[in-house]
Image (cartoon, rainbow, N blue to C red):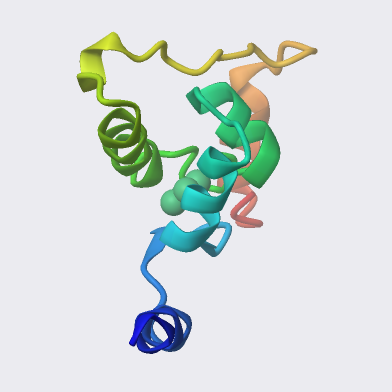
Amino acid sequence: MGGEVVDEKRKHPVIICRCNDITLEDVERAIEQGCRDLECLRKTLRIGMGPCQGRTCIPLLMRILARRLGKRVDELPLPVVRAPIIPVPIDLFLRSVEEGDGG
Ligand code: FES
């Protein structure tokens, strides 16, 4: 009976991070292996490091983690945000758009 649930999860995984294809099962496994905060989950799974920078997955992840730890979402520390190593002039992006390379 328990095997059916496991098979169903593998057939129809619940995707938490679409950018990096991270499933609920991946998140739950990382928590079971000792991750107790968002920073650990980010480093372990690379969740929140895709093109959307976690706009979709970080709120979901916070709710999952809070539920698993028996805390409220606002009790969890937020992930560390790091500035770029080298400042990039904004006109570099504008020139790129004007030249039509989209990048
Ligand atoms: S959905 Fe997770 S980084 Fe975009």
Q: Residue at image x 49%, y 38%?
A: 53
- Up-down relation of residue 88 to residue 23 (above or below): above
Q: Residue at image x 29%, y 28%?
A: 66
| Left or right of residue 13, residue 81 in this image | right
Callout count: 0
Q: Residue at image x 37%, y 86%?
A: 8
Q: Nearer the viewer, residue 35 or 38?
A: 35
- Up-down relation of residue 82 to residue 20 (above or below): above
Asked whether residue 56 appears in the rendered view, the answer is yes
**Location of residue 23 in the rendering, given as x and y in whole percent from the top left corner:** 47, 62
Asked whether residue 18 appears in the rendered view, the answer is no
Residue sticking out furthest to the front: 1
| Left or right of residue 29, residue 24 in this image | left
Where on the picture, by quarter, is residue 90? top right
Question: Which quarter of the figure is the N terminus placed in?
Answer: bottom left
- Up-down relation of residue 39 to residue 14 (above or below): above
- Up-down relation of residue 69 to residue 21 (above or below): above
Q: Nearer the viewer, residue 71 or 42?
A: 71
| Left or right of residue 91, residue 22 in this image | left
**Location of residue 82 in the rendering, given as x and y in whole percent from the top left corner:** 63, 13
**Location of residue 2 in the rendering, given as x and y in whole percent from the top left corner:** 37, 80
**Location of residue 55 in the rendering, given as x and y in whole percent from the top left corner:** 36, 39
Where on the picture, by quarter, is residue 96? top right
Where on the picture, by quarter, is residue 26? bottom right
